[in-house]
Amino acid sequence: MWQIEITNTQTTSIMKPFISETIKYIGVDDTDLDLFESQYIIPNGISYNSYAIIDEKVAIMDSVDSRKCEEWLANVEEALQGRTPDYLVVQHMEPDHAGSLAAIAARYPEMTIVASERAVKMIPQFFHECDLSARTLVVKEGDTLALGRHTLQFFMAPMVHWPEVMVTYEQSEKVLFSADGFGKFGALSHDEEWACEARRYYFNICGKYGQPVQALLKKAAQLDIAQIYPLHGPVLSDNLGYYISLYDTWSKYEPEVKGVFVAHASIHGGTAVVANSFAEMLRERGVKVSVADLCRDDMAEAVEDAFKYDRLVVAAASYDANVFPPMHDFLHHLQLKGYQKRRVGIIENGSWAPTAGRVMRGMLEQMKEVEIVEPMVTIISRMKPENQEAMRALADALTE
């Protein structure tokens, strides 16, 4: 059962991989990669996590991205000390975790590949050059695999965040191998606070799949879990209630912070002036405010903050009878990630025929349980004294 006891969340920091005599960390850091999934900035790199369970039979838990295959295979050999792995458990077929599957299969031809039925069907999609069909063991919900003193139990986790995903519970050491769940950006060689990069990771990678994450949390709540071993980021062993409570909040699309996130997209600076002036109005009312320049700031962080706060204000210039593209891109990202259950204010700017507000409203109206707060503020080219009344009215409506 989950042990929900939340202690001082401000001091939570990265924890290095736990290594015991029977479960060994064999993953690798990648500090050379600049963009995860070719879109997310990772200034501190990323870890590709893999684990070896040493028992009467040996199980390797997932492989790594092909970028780090040779380093990983060396880690495997060091951990096994001359033994041969009996099983490779594939929890997720995405290339950053299964990219070295064919390489380890070739090195250990007697090894069996354990995966969900959907994952087994995906293997030839990625590795058409080798036929591994005779070496696979399909497992279903609740199936177990005895290694000796250790027993693996498998639970299906479809759409967290691919359809073939499963997680694995090791019964004797009470470890949940959680696939992409509870993962974060950042290599393990960098010591950093967990929540910020885990939040950015969650909403940009898994954010659309709140219901599947909730379903997985309900399954995991029935297990006695002492440690969580994700495929990215540190092993989690202390204060599990903190991490679980955040995942519960995130996957329910509930805000984490009472405050307003102001996101602006300005061509020549006029809209930025309005957005920052509006943010000051909110601060004067005692509201916690975060501001982002969508033309310059990390888009993934903007998406993260939109989910983090309970209110959002979008301010953008009109452009080609539409909305300035950085704002369109931001709202499109929110649509993709299932943005919902928020109150949103709109500020538009235009020099002859303002269109940004109409476009932003239309995109927001497609999102679930998003309340558009009136009035919409319209600026003509530059903020003027006569705009203050409408801005104050919107600030009042957002803070009432």
Image (cartoon, helix red, strand yellow):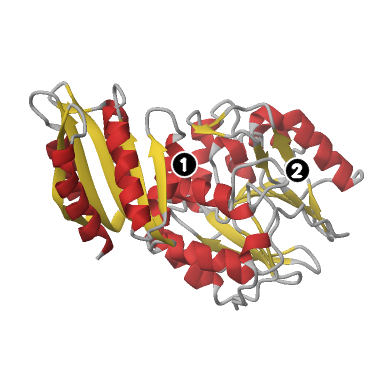
Q: Amino acid at mark 2?
A: Glu
* Three-letter amino acid code at the position of disc 1: Glu
When the figure is inspected, residue 268 is found, relative to residue 5, above or below; the finding is above
Residue that mark 1 sits on: 301
Whether residue 394 is visible:
yes
Q: Secondary structure at mark 2?
A: loop
Which quadrant holds the N terminus?
bottom right
Q: Position of residue 386 (x, y in %)?
A: 13, 40
Q: CA distance from mark 2 to mark 1?
A: 45 Å
Query: Looking at this view, is 347 or 282 the one in front?
Result: 282
Q: Left or right: 77 with respect to 371? A: right
Mark 1: secondary structure: helix
Q: Which residue occupies the extreme right position in the image?
A: 81
- Vertical side of 140 occupied by 73: above or below: above
Q: Residue at x 71, y 30 (%)?
A: 68
| Residue at x-position 59% and y-position 75% | 2
